[in-house]
Image: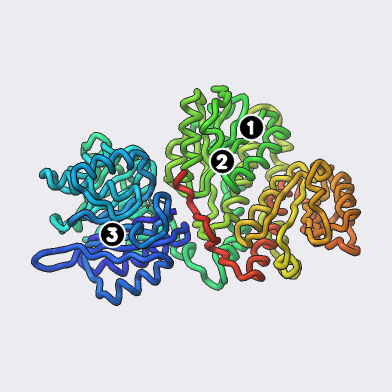
Amino acid sequence: MCGIVGAIADRDVVPVLIEGLKRLEYRGYDSSGIAVLEQGAQPDIRRVRRTGRVSEMASAADAEGFNSVLGIGHTRWATHGGVTEANAHPHISAGVALVHNGIIENHEEQREKLRALGYVFESQTDTEVIAHLMHHHLKGGDSLLSALQRTVKELTGAYALAVMSRAEPDHFVCARMGCPLLVGLGDGENFVASDVSAIISSTRRVIFLEEGDTADVRRDGVQVYDAHDQPIDRGVHLSDVSLASLELGPYRHFMQKEVHEQPRALGDTIEAAIDAGGFPAELFGRNAEAVLSGITGVQILACGTSYYAGMTARYWIESIAGLPCNVEIASEYRYRAAYADPKHLVVTLSQSGETLDTMEALKYAKSLGHLHTLSICNVPESAIPRASELVCYTRAGAEIGVASTKAFTTQLAALFQLTVVLGKLHGRVDATREADYLEQLRFLPGSVQHALNMEPQIAAWAERFARKSSALFLGRGLHYPIALEGALKLKEITYIHAEAYPAGELKHGPLALVDEDMPVVVIAPNDSLLEKVKSNMQEVRARGGELFVFADQDSNFVESEGVHVIRTPRHAGVLSPIVHTIPVQLLAYHTALARGTDVDKPRNLAKSVTVE
Ligand code: HGA
């Protein structure tokens, strides 16, 4: 969602801000803006804001000759107030400019208070109250830093903030609570960003701010303060985000690139297990053995695609590890009086590690009495893993396409490894089975590559899908969540209405939708439920529905009138859901291409969902 970048340097920072905002575009946004300090005897703040693409805002900044050694920038994904230039950030209150990610929950109360003090509001945003509060405290004699430290104590809600003032042209300040923010350390220049990708071409050395922190960022140094305004050393990390992972290379879209990166991403995610020759508990952290052997069940919390990864894991955990497993959508869990067994391990899944609903669900689970938490996440040092006792980082690399692909399959690979670890610790997986699972895992990247090779056949199907307005996806058992994922991918990037059902559920309702205009995608691997799925397919054919079947190489499906079949590689056993994800991703991708939709930035969606 929203993105922040700020810089102070000896050089013109406008290109740094623009490049940073462009790198944050993938997160989803509707408007953007920058504010810079105009040099001269009497420095003043200049600002440009636009709705639409960063490139349009950048052209306007260029046309107006923006050039400065200090500036802040923002991409906005509106939460409070429509998508208008007046609501775009930065917001200014007489000489103070700021950008904000998050939501200020007490903005109405603050607005009334500020109106009574004579402040006039120019936007409908919650953010503008922060600008006026800052101004109010500066007028009262505070420095920029102390005004910020005073202001944040009057806010409830979530924020990442970067603030500059024309009265203090040699620095800017920033703060975080509930939204990620980091400081980048350069050579005689320093930065702030909501995501390391925004500043990666300037520096890899970063300080992650913690909840309640503020920071004073100067050209020659940075000082971080904790929630009690005491100076604190948060340590410097070297980011391993690679520039190549942020660039498109020979691909047309990031989604296409990321789908094709899956053999590599999976290989990296399972590398530690392969190197260890098995599934040691340490894959999940140093203390993992003690924690995981003491638990009696698993509670998975996640949103969107990650939730479907959790649903798949439930089948694995119950059947392989023999532990009860419950999976729940984080945004629902956090608002209900859920039953909490302290001995059930809470597992949160989030690509970004910032998903607000998942973070809040994690905090809520702890407040309900859960003692042990584990996070599976793709972004090192992000908020959710840092709030978790045990961590497993998937090694998908930066995922830019809004529709998650490699993050999903690598989450599945991590969850499978967790399952086997639990199975071993709870006496359900012996050395022979462990070796067998390792062998299956070793074949996984190759099977995924085979599935990718089916792209031309799937692209041919996509031409027909592009003309449809609805689609049904069917799967059973382990593959039901993959049907859900297939329907979600199709909805997200093609805007075709799609639903997924466990195939046995068809006759309990959705069969009423089936006619010759309704394509029905069936995930039909050669497993114990294959004959059941075949019966469900007959029910569709009998009503004139057209079937598009993804079957394993070794199942003897034949094409016939109204039944189209693509054979995926040899049955991949318990890892089959991972392999069967590839064709549904490709189907959505090629259907989107045929419909001409914006694959990497589907309408109304954002990448890291950092608001409620
Ligand atoms: N509430 C602010 C910022 C929104 C945001 O962080 N979106 O991700 C606004 O609506 O401008």
Q: Is residue 390 above or below residue 603?
A: above
**Residue 146 falls in which quadrant of the image?**
top left
Residue drawn at the location 81% of the way across and 55% of the way down: 552
Amino acid type for the residue under numbered disc 3: Ile
| Of pointers 2 and 1, the one earlier in the residue sequence | 2
Q: Is residue 210 left or right of residue 25?
A: left
| Residue located beneath label 1 in the image | 326
Residue drawn at the location 18% of the way across and 66% of the way down: 38
Which mark is on residue 72?
A: 3
* Neighbours of disc 2 within 10 Å: few (<14), some (14-19), many (20+): many
Residue drawn at the location 46% of the way across and 40% of the way down: 384
| Residue 456 x/y as whole percent | 73, 70
Q: Is residue 275 visible?
A: no
| Residue located beneath label 2 in the image | 302
| Residue 134 x/y as whole percent | 21, 47
**Cα gap from disc 2 to disc 1, whole angstroms:** 11 Å
Residues at badges 2 and 1 in contact (C-beta under 8 Å)?
no
